[in-house]
Each structure stands twice: as C-alpha cells, then as structure tokens.
Image (cartoon, rainbow, N blue to C red):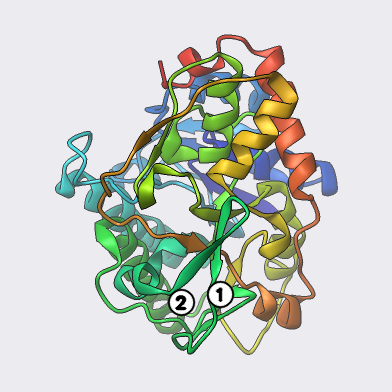
Amino acid sequence: MKLLITGICGFAGSTLAQAWLEAEPGLVVYGMDNLSRPGSEHNRTALQKLGVTLIHGDIRMPSDFDILPPVDWVIDAAANPSVLAGVDGMTSSRQLIEHNLLGTVNILEYCKRHQAGFILLSTSRVYNIATLADVAVEVKGEAFQLSGGILPSGLTPSGVAESFSTNAPVSLYGSTRLASETLALEYGETFGFPVWINRCGVLAGAGQFGKADQGIFSFWINSWLRRRPLSYIGFGGNGHQVRDCLHPRDLVTLLRKQALPGATAPVRIVNLGGGVDNAMSLAELSGWCRDRFGEHAVSSVCQMRRFDIPLLVMDSALARNTWGWQPETPLAAILEEIALHAEAHPDWLEMSGAA
C-alpha cells in the first residue's frame, strides 16, 4: 500500500508515519510538508532515515500536488492546530482558512484525481463552545468535574460524544475543521472514494513541539523542567480546567483498519481521545511535575480568554463499538515519555519555537 501523509513533519504526522512503518514494514510512505513550523527539520531527518519520501510542498498551493505520485490513501495531518488561530494576532483569519479549509479542498481534488481514500484528523474543537462553557462544574480536589443535574445532549460523565452540538460558535479554527469534514464526506460520496473523519482530542507525547497551542502537556512539562514562566489563565487562576490526552501512535491501529480494502462501517465520524482515564487538570499536571522535577512557581491570571472551556474530555465509545478501538498508552506513560524527552533535549523549547 502507498500512503501520503500531509503535515508529516509535525508531531502527529511524523509519529503516525513511524508507528505505521513499524507495524507494516512494507508500507510505502510519502510525506508533504511546508516545513514552516520550528522543529520540522528535526523530524524530517528522522523520517528520511526510515525511507519516507518527503516532498517540500504547501497544501494551499494546488500546483504542489501536481508532482505527487498516486497513492492509495491520504492521511491529512496538516492544519493550524490552535483554537485561537486567526484571532490571536499570530495568523490572520484568511491564513487560517487557507491552511485549514482551502488546503483540504486541494487534498480532496488530489484524492478525486487518483481515487485515493481520505482520512481527516479533525478536532474536538468542532463542538459548540457556548454550551461547553456553560456546563455546570464543581471542584473536586484540584480539578473540575461535572456537578450533576441535567446535561446537554451528547454529554455524559464519559465525556463529549459525536451527538453533541456542532452549532456555532465553535471558533474560526473549529469551523474550518467542521467545514472540511462536510466537504470531505461530500467529495467521497460524489466522486466515489472512501472517507473517514476522526475527531481527535488533545494529542501528546515525546517530540511534540514546545508551544502551548500545539500541545499543552508537552509545553507545560518542558517549561516546568526549564523553570520557565507558567500561568493558570482564567477560571479563577487555579488551573482546575481539565483535558484528556491521547498518544498519536494509538491512532495507527484504527487507521490501518480504516485503510483496509473495502472497509465499511455504519458511521463515518468518530471521536478519538484518551477519555476520563487519561484526563487531568493543569493543577494536577503541575503536581505531577512537582513530584518529578521539584518546585516551580505558577502565576495566576484570572482574566478569561476567548473560547476557553472548563472541561473537555472525549467519549470514544462509538469508535470502540464500531472499530474495536481504544487508547493504549496510559496517561502516566505519556507524561513520563515527554519528561524523558525533555531531559534528553535541553534546547527543545528553543528548537520548536517556544523561546
């Protein structure tokens, strides 16, 4: 089988390529990346050693797809991953849409031309922000938890399910991913190629770039180890907000099933996350760092940011029931893996753009 991974030099793309090649040595992997993110060059070298054919290209440029060979499947791991993208002054709204939506159109046109299957790595941030922000929570220990009562449709103690509202507002970032999902399904239906949509929660693991918007767990651990400034932002400045995390290599078992010839399933969209067992608050993450590395002060900023929500955990029951998939790497192992990488790479924050 021949596979194309867009955004292959990012954390998710490079991890998927390495894990898939380990599981399937005969796989032919092509990768496309514009190498715009600090740290990408580091991953490019490692991928070349594995025999991956790398193409320096930008998914926003239709002509960059003209030089690509035909493949059987495309895994789209190329996107601006920040919910604040387009409104934080770092990127414009037009740039966000060019990356996350128009880039998807160009990939889908490539899939149409070569009848390649398409798998989109989408996001948990397609779910309605206002409803998530208004969910009643209470503090237990150092973390928010649901406080009971009537929950909105699609939310249970197990987390957010696929039936949760995707009505606006979902942020500009979330809307580009949601629009990409719809376009992908329509392209697949219209032009006769298979499409799967995987809504991923927070991805985390060793080698993740040291920026908060590209992975809060890696950023926090690397910053704590280096005694860099850290702040709890919003929600009283106590760090009680909760996320779950998932190692991207755990996606490979599912992706390989989805890429089997003639693979079918009653649903095209599933949530993929670490779930309640792999969830923790920032304050709890600080406790882990304190035990691992020693004391470090964290400041408090009570002012809220746009799009912040107190608790977001992915319910992956549909993926489990449909594909027999579940996360394999426990939270403790993910955190320790990040810590060991941080200790072995003292310049990681500078290299990956957080300096």
Q: CA distance from mark 2 to mark 1?
A: 6 Å
Residue 38 in picture, x, y percent from top left? 43, 22
Residue 300 in picture, x, y percent from top left? 38, 35
Secondary structure beneath label 2: helix
* Depth order, front residue of 117/137: 137
* Depth order, front residue of 251/303: 303
Question: How many other residues sit within 10 Å of disc 1, few (<14), some (14-19) or many (≥20)?
Answer: many
* Depth order, front residue of 216/301: 301
Image check: 293 left or right of 347? right
Q: Check residue 188 in the rendering and tell me which mark sits there, or answer none.
A: 2
Q: Residue at x 54, y 81 (%)?
A: 148
Pointers 2 and 1 in contact (CB under 8 A)? yes
Residue identifier under label 1: 194
Say which label, 2 or 1, has the lower sequence index: 2
User: Does residue 23 appear in the picture of this structure?
Assistant: yes
Q: Which quadrant of the figure contains the N terminus? A: bottom right
User: Does residue 50 appear in the picture of this structure?
Assistant: no
Q: Amino acid at mark 1?
A: Pro
Q: What number of labels is visible?
A: 2
Image check: 355 left or right of 175? right
For residue 34, above or below residue 17 = above
Question: How many other residues sit within 10 Å of disc 2, few (<14), some (14-19) or many (≥20)?
Answer: many
Picture quadrant where residue 141 is located: bottom right
Q: Amino acid at mark 2?
A: Gly
* Depth order, front residue of 43/225: 225
Secondary structure beneath label 1: loop
Residue 213 in picture, x, y percent from top left? 41, 40
Residue 65 in picture, x, y percent from top left? 39, 46
Q: Check residue 236 in the rendering and tell me which mark sits there, or answer none.
A: none
Q: Residue at x 29, y 45 (%)?
A: 60
Q: Which quadrant of the figure contains the C terminus? A: top left
Picture quadrant where residue 48 is located: top right
